[in-house]
Image: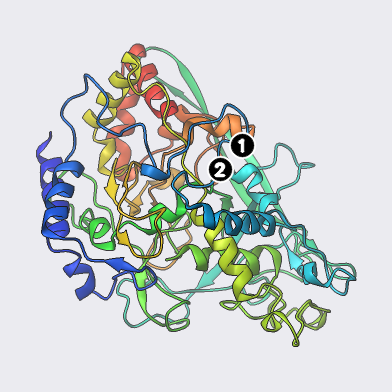
Amino acid sequence: MTTSRRRKAAALLLASSLAGGWAAAQGLEDPHLPVVPRTPAERTRIETIQAPTQDFSRAEAFEAMQGGAATVRARENADAFSLSSANMPFAREMDFKLGNALFRKTWVAAPSSTRASDGLGPLYNARGCQDCHLKDGRGHPPESPEDSAVSMFLRLSIPGGPTPMEIQEWLATSPDPTYGHQLQDFAASGLAAEGRMEISYEEIPVTLADGTVVSLRKPTYALGDPGYGPPHAELQLSPRVAPQMIGLGLLEAIPAADILALADPEDADGDGISGRASIVPSLEFGGEFGKPMLGRFGHKAGIATVREQSASAFSGDMGLSTPLFPDPWGECTEAQSACRAAPHGQEPEVREGLEVDGPSLDLVTFYARNLAVPQRRKVEDPQVLRGKEIFYGLNCTGCHNPKFVTHRLKDQPEQSFQLIWPHTDLLLHDMGEGLADDRPEGRASGREWRTAPLWGIGLTQQVSGHSYFLHDGRARNLLEAILWHGGEAQTQRDAVVALPTPDREALIAFLESL
């Protein structure tokens, strides 16, 4: 183990031994989870289990079970990401199926005879959750100007705005005065869509040490056909593809203290990798500038909980009101008066007067928490083991932290006290100018991104029908994704360029086994 890894491992063990005391002191404990404190004996076990391995001759105990006891056998078809947690009690299976039905539901604009399904928009990006997360998998950029961009959209903002006083290093932005937080490219009858996302690509060749030439496509984005006049002169835009849905409840159940222990904002250990926590105001606990919480979800870790992530998608992507986002017009701004005045699907006499009421949001949240992580394949394959050794040796684990143990939870047996292998630290990292979107989000600068979990990445082609990666799908395979790494990961990227062909192929084989 390298010196830097020993130091970070020691920091993680210290955080575990303190039982989250530092996180509690910072007000970042996990109030949405029914947590049972760890006992001294449990903390000792966790310290041993979470220590990085030094033996690459064989797979580690339980390494194939990426999602702990919630792991499911990997199917060989497109349904590999659509199974419920393997350890789910039988009594809760109906909740999962009802949540699945709501996730797959196609919404329609109001007024409609199907009052339980109306309220879409009036401006929107998709008519249902599964339009973006087809088969609960990863979205992709359009293949051509004529192709639908339904699983991808543009985030919008302008510089300046209010700042949550409790959160240091907040980079203030505001929504575009006309177009809001994201571009909606569909509209209900009688209204104009906000516009369309325009993408152009430039091919950039990269020559590897063995002479292999890899072409990277560099995208440029623009807002085309603006339907409500020109956007703000200082408009900042950033593309987003829909992420895969597996393992969200397990990521939510990782103790905040264990994630914070991996942060090294000043690079005190000198390994070139820092990592900063995304701290966000939680809408679930105190409103817009309410309780600060650790951000975990989204490409810049801008949302703290699965429930808030689900509600945000209902509002921003489909224009549907929920208890957390009660406006029936979704993303329509004050400048879009016709949109705000359009019919909506709220019914004051039923469903709490909301298009997606509390019980419905809870069912979708339960479904999202319990989409199971598939079991790893080929964990004992010699090439995969060699690839794992390279992955560790290059300190790719400095961001893609292999394993955690989740909280012990009173009412969530599926996520309770599981050894999981997500290969992420859920922290923000500077990924260099090549991946920069130049758009801040909360504490994340225009060069920072949350470390993406790697579990299930080898099944992307099987589930989603493509192999596009990174926040905007620019990488057409795993090697391209690695070659786009810069900033804190520049050393690792350059080391991969220099690898002998067999070692590079072993590294890719390891990633494909996840």
- Please determine whether, in this image, residue 478 is positioned above or below residue 110: above
**Residue drawn 41% across the image and 39% down it:** 454
Horizontal side of 455 relative to 345 (left or right) equals left
Q: In the depicted view, which residue is nearer to us: 212 or 190?
A: 190
As shown in the figure, which amino acid type bears the numbered disc 2?
Leu
- Please determine whether, in this image, residue 134 is positioned above or below residue 41: above
As shown in the figure, which amino acid type bears the numbered disc 1?
Asp
- Percent of width and height locating residue 387: 32, 22
Any part of residue 448 in sight: no
Q: Secondary structure at mark 2?
A: loop
- Please determine whether, in this image, residue 339 is positioned above or below residue 273: below
Number of the label disc, if any, that sits on residue 79:
1
- Percent of width and height locating residue 396: 29, 36
Q: CA distance from mark 1 to mark 2?
A: 7 Å
Q: In the depicted view, which residue is nearer to us: 199 or 350?
A: 350
Q: In the depicted view, which residue is nearer to us: 473 or 80?
A: 80
- Please determine whether, in this image, residue 62 is positioned above or below residue 191: above
- Percent of width and height locating residue 350: 73, 82
Where residue 175 sits, quadrant-wise, is: bottom right
Q: Secondary structure at mark 1?
A: loop
Is label 1 in contact with label 2 (beta carbons under 8 Å)?
Answer: yes
Where residue 107 sits, quadrant-wise, is: bottom right
**Residue drawn 39% across the image and 21% down it:** 378
For label 2, the crowd category at 10 Å Cα-Cα, with few meaning under 14, some 14 to 19 and many 20 or more, is many
- Percent of width and height locating residue 11: 13, 53
Q: How is the image coloured?
A: rainbow
Where residue 68 sits, quadrant-wise, is: top left
Any part of residue 82 in sight: yes
For label 1, the crowd category at 10 Å Cα-Cα, with few meaning under 14, some 14 to 19 and many 20 or more, is some
Q: Which residue is mark 2?
A: 83
